[in-house]
Image (cartoon, grey):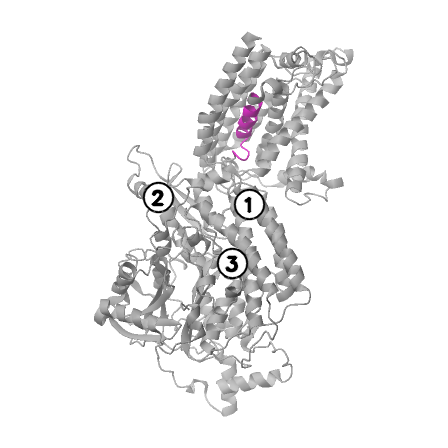
Amino acid sequence: MISSVLAVELAYWQQTTLRVIGGLVAILLPAGGLVYVYLFKMMSFMQSRLGPMEAGPYGSMQLLAEVGKFLQKEDIIPTKADRFVFLGAPFVVLLSTFLLLLVVPFGPDAWFVDLDTGIYFAMAVSSISVIGILMAGWGSSSKYSLLGGIRAAGQLIAYELPMILAVLGVVIQAGTLNMNEIVFAQANGEIFGWGGIGNPYIITQFVGFMLFLVAIQAELTQPPFDMPVAESELVAGYMTEYSGLRFLLFFIGEFATAGVFSAIAAVLFLGGWYVPFLAPEHNLYNVLGPLVLMAKIFGVAGLIFWFRFTYPRFREDQLQRLAWKFLIPIALVNIVATGVLKVVF
Amino acid sequence: MAETTEETEVVPLVDHVREELLGTLTSHLGDAIVASHIKPGDELWIRVTTEGWAEVADVLRNRLNFLFFDFVSAIDWLPSPYGREMDAQVDTIVAAANGEALDAKPPEEMVQGYAGGDTRFQVFGRVLNVVDMLGLIIKADVPDTLVVPSWIAHYPGANWHEREVHEMYGISFDGNADMRNLYLPGDFEGYPLRKDFPLLARRVKPWPGIVDVEGMPGDDADDEADDTDAAEGDA
Amino acid sequence: MTATTGANERDQLAYIAAKAADSRVNVELETEGMTLNIGPQHPATHGTLRIVARLDGEQVISADPVMGYMHRGYEKLTEVRTYPQVTTLINRIDWLGSFANEVPFILAAEKLMEVEAPPRAKWIRTILFEMSRIANNLLGLGDMAAQLGAVTPVFYAFRDREYVLNQVEAVTGGRFHPNFDRIGGLKDDIPAGWIASTKDSMVKMREAADELESLVFGNEIFTARTRGIGIIPAEVALEYGMSGANLRGSGVDWDLRRDAPEGMAYNEADWKVWTHPDGDSYARAWVRLQEMREGTYIVDQLLDSLPSGPVMAKVPRIIKVPEGEAFVETENPLGVMGYYIVSKGDLVPFRVKIRSASFNNIAVVPWVLKGVYVPDIISILASLYFILGDIDR
């Protein structure tokens, strides 16, 4: 897509620069926005307080202050830490987030990579963060970190399965793994012959959508599934020993991943960059698409953070029981039902 | 403490409930009960022999249904060699006025409280029957070996209390192997709650609260005079 | 209540779990145990309690609380302070329910001096006592939710607690350390208009209780995390000397407010002692919530029947307590708190034994934590609800 922005042919290095900038914007903008809108403001209002009010109008510059604060802090490395593993862990986590973003379409012609196996790729790279978290847990040489890391590993692996199974329903219905084509499939879909608003899969795959939400909540290690970081038990889990920039990387990774997962959920279930009553081939989507997707990201993330600020935390064994005894069977039934209905209709 | 509402209306001179309890205890324990004291409508104190200290817990817990364990502690009856730790200033004034030396104050005698006693240290504890709302305080003398039997076989909750007594008074409990310090650092020397353990804060700095400055309502004049009078009368 | 509330199935299971954890140490797999130091600096220990937990995976083999990081030696310090000065100190034992700390000490001293506070003082004493219970229980419940990972309820608890603290401040001048109780009565009478504003705040507290009930107790995850967790049978609770909501959560119907109301005005109000038969974390928290709500009704009734008259009995200007020994305990927010005063007829007590509630409540921790999982350590501790000052004294 980028090779012909505004009908200007770009050299390879120009394309690369644009891609890097685009990637950073696509990661940092939702992440910063989510932190401000939900972590700072929504959470504060839910808890009957105001949140940051001093930095900038309505506290909007607080984020910069926070980043500045983290950058100034000393980068502490525990004496007995496994240095290489400890230092590398935040980057591995962030890498997973960036890789996830690759396949998300922002418009009919706006994507980083248009993979035919897009969703498959996304599911695969999302597990890379487990390695980063395990690295952090092991490399910190702290018992809290270790417990957090092991919990995270068990949890992320357990919830990968319901997530993939939830996605399978969409894939069966759309008949493609390409994420942009999934959007087109929804945009061109019809509800009992009426194609007015397309066919966002949240209607037909509502069960899948709920499963996917639960699973990403667990993948993001957010309450009620925040055992790996459980601050009242494990101090901060695998992040306990991190400070300064590296802690900031984990923090950005957490919220950026929330943003990217919301984007994937929006693409899969809410029609991605498509808005009803505007044909998907319309030129306006080149500008409107990213904005629509952003709005949908904030919608889905709003749900995620609402749960986060409301619920207490499960215990590790209860979490596993929920995944294996409830979510996975439901997901399997959903797949079978989708398959049968696909053949029938 | 443990009386019912009917008892408050007519305070009996003889507390039948506690007399009866004392009788029952005596029939169970025999000579182990050395002395007793009853405040009608309030509390029963009994003093048992050192050997009977565990036995009385056994009887109370297992036969008389005194299931609730309240506390175990100890007391050092030695009059404090440092006075009240606040005497220093007052006594100087008084002694100077009378032309006496400060140390001339005769040492007080060691007087044990209710139910008497023979030794400097006593352990005391309280258990309660929550059904009848009846409690009693059990005391026992501590011999010079500073070892008394432990209660933990009958009241597991006594463990921490005994550890506290051990570190604060140096009294050991036979049958409780876990005598680590509970509050104090492991290498702390001395037994802080003994009367001959000086309160260092008072040694190094005079106590500012020596004069009770708060006036009573409607009593704003002559506060100073009152205080001096009281202090003199006290010294 | 029958003292041994029947070893029902649940109690037996708890026993078996504890025993099994004793014997089953790494027989199946030759794994290496791990010792986890929870505290003294840890987000969940409100203060500086440290728990040395021996773990097998995430299961606790043995847990040993270590305290003393905040030991202030009050039993020694009381020996060198006059009776009125002692109340300042003991305010700081359970700092969330500090007025309640003063009351048993004052009652014990009054018993020795054989003075009795006038009715109005008794009434106000009881009202303030219940208000500190309301504030304390509310914060305890909010905190328990926070320990379980729900970040929001604790803010509601802090917000609503202000209504009570403002009322306490209006009377005593202090929000946390009122130092208001005197031998023979109270320092002052209540200010004008206080009764109406207190009734308003009690309505708000009932709303807060309802809100907390629906927000926390109605939550399935909260139920899953607390039901059947940390079961303490009545018998065990008694022999460890647990008290307060923790004991009543184990089904023992024993409340000193009802069973030993001397010096207080509890008999003048119509109220109920709440118990719960289960003995688990949920039961303890539930009893705490009910007691908070019941407390608002007690306050309302006592405000309606507040007698007139002085708030201070005739006591000497300089308080000298006659020789003797007295023990008084009351039902404080955290449980039974008692003072054993030995007086030698002096200005200062000869010996004060402070029997604090949390010390006994936490003594059961090594027993109850055997065989549970690491997250349950936190939820059980939160449900036992202790204040570190009340343990360390």
Question: In this rendering, do the residues under marks 3 and 1 share a single chain?
Answer: yes
Q: Does the magenta stretch include residue A217?
A: yes
Instruction: Nearest to the eye among marks 2 and 3: give it.
Output: 3
Q: Where is residue C303 in the image (x, y as percent from the top left)?
A: 60, 64
Mark number, residue C382 = none
Question: In this rendering, do the residues under marks 1 and 2 share a single chain?
Answer: yes
Q: Where is residue C161 in the image (x, y as percent from the top left)?
A: 60, 54
The tag earlier along the polypeptide, 2 or 3, is 2
Element under disc 1: helix
Q: Mark 3 lies on which chain?
A: C
The N terminus of chain C lies in which quarter of the figure? Answer: bottom left
Front residue of C17/B88: it is C17
Q: Distance between the residues labelled 2 and 3?
A: 33 Å
Instruction: Nearest to the eye among marks 3 and 1: give it.
Output: 3
Pointer 1: what residue? C213
**Magenta region:** A208-225
Q: Say what amino acid the circle numbered 2 marks.
A: Ala
* Residue appearing at x 61%, y 58% in the figure: C165
Q: Mark yes or no: residue B131 visible.
A: yes
- Mark 3 closeness class: few <14, some 14–19, many ≥20 residues within 10 Å: some
Q: Does the magenta stretch include residue A227?
A: no
Element under disc 2: helix
Q: Which chain carries label 2?
A: C
Element under disc 3: loop
Q: Mark 1 lies on which chain?
A: C
